[in-house]
Image (cartoon, rainbow, N blue to C red):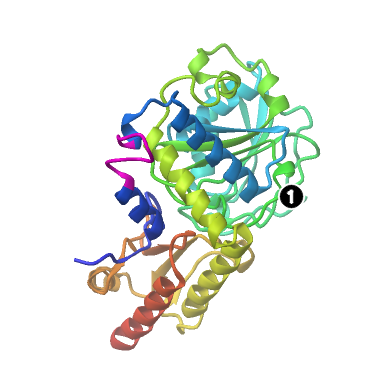
């Protein structure tokens, strides 16, 4: 067996050099004479690992000193509830932009902890567009404005931060963090499940402006308080140490490769090649998203005849192109082009798509 090209939306492809290093260090990490999974998270060795991981992430993203970096448990879905609990007073309004399945779920989960106001919802376009600037109004008294920077399922992406008029912008970056440079200062909170561009599942990375940690929020246990986690260096409880370790290796690898700007160029090249193949297929394949809203990370596409889907998936997997089946809500196919996926994978997919269309068109 050989490794295939993994287009999974998440848990997703990890850099092979990172996996090989983890494999080599699995039994004995550094000078600890034990695995990184077996040492105390409060020991000097792991504290040094944690500090380096944070420093590397700060360097990659350009995170200013007035922002805290948290390494937390749970997927991003957990934080759909924790964010209003920490940032909104009881009954306070929060504005949500709904542009796909994940932002819709965030708004739904938030209703238990704040007065959710959906200021924009692109359901009428079947989540193939972004809300136009000026088509919605932000409440200046809102606790925050929430959006999904990139919709993993529907394949739409905000190209930049929206103007919220000073209301803190909270953004779920789970499927696009570290894929391109962003201005962190335009956001109050950036959070991301690790299992797409950072590392394995079970870890959430959060970048939060420190003044927001001082908000009283709502009555909650200490374990649910971002302020408490920040005060304890993300070690209020036992953290997911192996996931944190792997994330640190990914950050180190990214810096060695040239940083976020280099990956942005790689990602654009991959996405442009795949979209060109779809758009140039004469209708055999189609991507439903308007061009200005297309994601660089997640590319859903449909065959002109759904009866061909099973053959496409069977033959693509045999060709070493893995996890191309589309999300159950959309059907069709989906190719996720995360940082660790090499251009060669997209080139192989494009070649396969052309050959499949010639044989079945």
Q: Residue at x 23, y 70 (%)?
A: 314
Q: Is residue 210 magenta?
A: no
Give the quarter of the image for residue 132: bottom right
Identify the residue position indicated by label 1 in the image.
Answer: 135
- Badge 1 crowding class, 10 Å Cα cut-off, few under 14, some 14 to 19, many 20 or more, is few
Residue positioned most to the front: 31
- Using the image, determine if residue 316 lies above or below residue 30: below
Image quadrant holding the N terminus, namely bottom left
Q: Residue 202 in the image: x percent, y percent?
A: 39, 37
For the C terminus, give its image quadrant.
bottom left
Residue 328 showing in the rendered view: no
Furthest toward the bottom, the residue is 358
Q: Residue at x 54, y 52 (%)?
A: 176
Q: Is residue 152 left or right of residue 30?
A: right
Q: Which residues are magenta?
A: 25-35
Residue 115: image location, x then y, percent: 62, 25
Say left or right for 333 vs 84. left
Q: Which residue is located at x 27 percent, y 64 percent?
A: 3
Which of the two residues, 103 or 1, is positioned nearer the viewer here?
1
Q: Residue 193, relative to residue 196: is it above or below?
A: above
Observer-nearest residue: 95 or 124? 95
Residue in front for this viewpoint, 183 or 110: 183
Residue 12 pos. (x, y %): 38, 53
């Amino acid at each position: 067996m050989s490794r295939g090209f993994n287009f999974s939306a998440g848990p997703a492809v990890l850099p092979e050099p990172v996996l090989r290093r983890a494999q080599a260090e699995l039994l004995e990490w550094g000078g600890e004479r034990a695995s990184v999974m077996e040492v105390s998270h409060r020991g000097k060795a792991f504290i040094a690992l944690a500090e380096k991981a944070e420093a590397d992430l700060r360097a990659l993203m350009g995170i200013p000193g007035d922002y805290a970096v948290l390494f937390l448990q749970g997927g991003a879905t957990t934080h759909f509830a924790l964010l209003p609990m920490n940032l909104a007073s009881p009954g306070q309004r929060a504005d949500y932009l709904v542009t796909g399945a994940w932002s819709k779920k965030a708004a739904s989960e938030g209703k238990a902890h704040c007065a959710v106001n959906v200021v924009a919802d692109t359901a009428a376009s079947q989540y193939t567009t972004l809300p136009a600037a000026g088509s919605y109004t932000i409440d200046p008294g809102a606790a925050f404005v929430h959006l999904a920077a990139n919709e993993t399922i529907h394949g739409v992406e905000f190209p930049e931060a929206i103007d919220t008029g000073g209301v803190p912008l909270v953004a779920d970056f789970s499927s696009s963090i570290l894929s391109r440079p962003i201005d962190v200062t335009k956001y109050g909170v950036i959070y991301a499940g690790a299992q797409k561009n950072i590392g394995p599942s079970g870890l959430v990375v959060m970048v939060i402006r420190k003044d927001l940690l001082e908000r009283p929020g709502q009555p909650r246990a200490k374990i649910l308080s971002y302020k408490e986690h920040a005060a304890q260096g993300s070690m209020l409880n036992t953290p997911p140490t192996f996931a944190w370790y792997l994330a640190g290796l990914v950050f180190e690898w990214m810096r060695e490769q040239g940083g976020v700007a280099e990956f942005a160029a790689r990602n654009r090249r991959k996405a442009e090649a795949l979209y060109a193949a779809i758009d140039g297929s004469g209708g055999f394949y189609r991507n439903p998203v308007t061009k200005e809203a297309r994601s660089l990370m997640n590319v859903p596409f449909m065959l002109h005849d759904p009866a061909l889907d099973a053959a496409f998936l069977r033959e693509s997997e045999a060709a070493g192109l893995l996890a191309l089946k589309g999300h159950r809500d959309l059907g069709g196919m989906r190719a996720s082009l995360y940082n660790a996926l090499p251009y060669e994978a997209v080139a192989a997919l494009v070649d396969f798509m052309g050959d499949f269309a010639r044989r079945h068109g």
